[in-house]
Amino acid sequence: MNEKLDEIFKGIKFKRAYDLDKIYEKVNEVDSSLTKDDVKEYLDSKVDSYDFFKTPNNKYEPISKTSFRVGVYNGKGVVKCGAYNYNIDEKNINGAIGSDLVLIDTSGGINRIRKVISRDLKYVMGEVYKDGSSYYIKPIDEDKQNLTIRVPGDEHIEGMRVYAYLDNMIGDNYYDAHIVKKYGFKDDPGRDILDEAYKYGVVDYMDDAIEKELELIPKKVLPADFIGRSDLRDKEIFTIDGVDTKDMDDAVSLETLENGNFLLGVHIADVPNYVKEGSAIDKRAFELGFSYYLANKVIPMLPHELSNGICSLNPDVDRLTITVFAEIDRHGNIKGHNIELGVIKSRLKMDYDNVNNILDDKEFDSKYIPFVRTLKNMYLLSLILRKKRMKEGAIDFERDELKLITDEDGSVSGLSRRIQRKAENMIEEFMLVANTVVATEFYYNKLPFIYRNHGNPDPEKINDFIYMINHLGYKANMDSDTPNVCQKLAILLNKSHNELSDMLKLSLIKCQKRAEYSAENKGHFGLALPCYTHFTSPIRRYPDLTVHRLIHKFIIEKDFDKKDLKSISKKLPVIAEQSTQRDKAEDNCEKEVMRMKCAEYMENHIGENFIGTVVSLDSNGMDVELDNMITGRVRRKDLDYDYELNDATFSYMSLNGFDDYYLGDVLNLECIRASKEDRIIDFKVLSKYKENNNINKNEINREKILKKDEKSCIIMLTREENNYSF
């Protein structure tokens, strides 16, 4: 009946609130079989779900016609209602906390939270304190510190950081709870990272149900596991990862066929063989979405017993895989493929350093000698694949990343650069092949699936970016309508090797839209692929684990039960949305930990001198990137003289006739302020080390400084809080 009334109400236009008799009259015009009680029951259910509003005089109208809205409070003064965000002043929060579903009133130009509709709060992390004879927990989340959380017992230790389960609410924002895990104290090694991770919904914790499931999972491949699988143990298969990697979910192989084509094998750990859908381990993985690599700490999506054990493709032991074989010709075209279940035995756990030494004809570990020819052929194939991708318009950003070197206690002792070299690029090309093969198989067979989509960039952002780099002397003779414009811009930046190159590459990345997971295929702009997915990291990414389950059902078992197809089709958009949100959380969490640790490192270098490049400007100051890749701030108030931002020349212009500061200038700096707690690193300019002579320094009227407007946001590209990921 509700579905019938849903359709009828789509045709009813509410110009104002109507009483039940008037609404029933309109319904009766469409379907006379419905009674007034049917309509009242329907309307009351819609009031309960906050789709309709019921006035004090018992009239009904859609909530969208009122000043009320339903949304989710983010704990930081914003309620998200569909595509709209409503700012809420702290005094109008009305006891709401992050993730609450709330009813807000937007009347009178002031947004107020009127009611907390529902609260999905089960666990909280906080610090134990004592009040009188009772113990309580103070949450580390600021937005939850209005909660009173009591823990029974009298043997707790004040100051202990704990993870607690909220048993029940015994009053307004008053809970009884019990402690499920103790973590130590605030200043314990690694505690800062765990606290930061918790803010993004990431907790290093396993419950009893997970522990019990782990006890039942075998520690080695069983004879029964070979049934229905290809025995690939005689093939030359190996892994290539970082030196310290312990969770190895991908291995590779390569053969040269008689027709001269390559047979590439990408062997991915068959995680769903051990992690069953709906299990406690699976539910936990779904909540996390991804593994989190935070400075020196890893919080895995799957328990270490799986990610480093039976699901890791360790050398010299049997392991189960889902394997993609792709026949590729000498032009990089995939001539055929096969997706199958396999059993492999990796010959060697290779690391990128040794493989790069082989590819660069440098000294390497002697145990690699039997594999040198294969590795050289692999590199040749990767160059062929990359050349084809570039020809088709793929974007390639060559940008180093900052890597922290930490002591055993978790403190940062040094910094280094993470460089994408030949071996890393080679493995990336092979993973792209496997991901593309799997996505293509599902797309052309019209099967339910999860895709990794990446939309076209906003032309206005691209044109703004081109304007900026032309002003910086790059001579980019193109606009957003130029074919493969983003690829050409990336090539232009990759060829330049100056202080601004990395910043501009990051800015160009931020001109792109963020890639998302979806049950609908929309193509991947950055990779120039008609369809793409994530299949190759089921240990570390939940969408990959989902794709593996779909392969088992549709490709291996060929199970096309109509009821299952319908059920899966409904479920996949939910998984895709959750994965997209957790993908953002992972990016934000890793970036925030990096900011925190960089500030911690610089706390020990206050008063020291550095050389840094101006990489962005705004009305409050300049961002500078040091040679060690740490980014800090020169605040306008810390400049010796009066300066104003001039958007037209991408500069800070002196009002007293002193040197102007331009984007790309290299400065002598002194670190004057650093705070791990506040995530700030501030510098003072000592002198100009090197001026950016490429910038177009047009004559300007110093008495008429151009004011900042919305279109000048390109200066701010490197300071956007959003993260962008392909």
Image (cartoon, grey):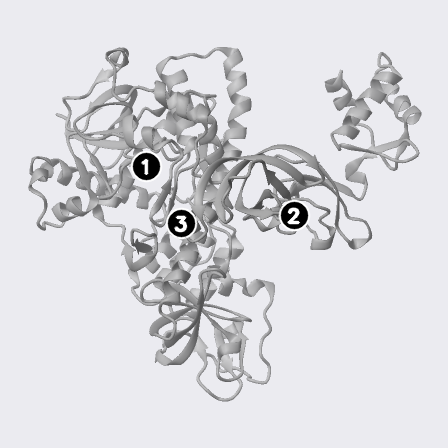
Do callouts 3 and 2 mark residues in contact (Cβ within 8 Å)? no
Mark 2 belongs to which amino acid? Asn
Amino acid under label 1?
A: Leu
Task: Look at the numbered disc 2 and give the secondary structure of its residue.
Answer: loop
Q: Mark 3: which secondary structure?
A: loop
Q: Which mark is residue 349?
A: none
Task: State yes or no: discs 2 and 1 in contact (Cβ < 8 Å).
Answer: no
Q: Is residue 658 positioned above or below 152 on the image?
A: below
- Who is closer to the viewer here, 137 or 52? 137
Picture quarter containing residue 18?
top right
View extreme (bottom): residue: 657
For the N terminus, which image quadrant? Answer: top right
- The residue under label 1 is 432
Q: Which residue is mark 3?
A: 484
- Residue designated by label 2: 146
Horizontal arrangement in the rendering, residue 568 relative to residue 366 (left or right) = right
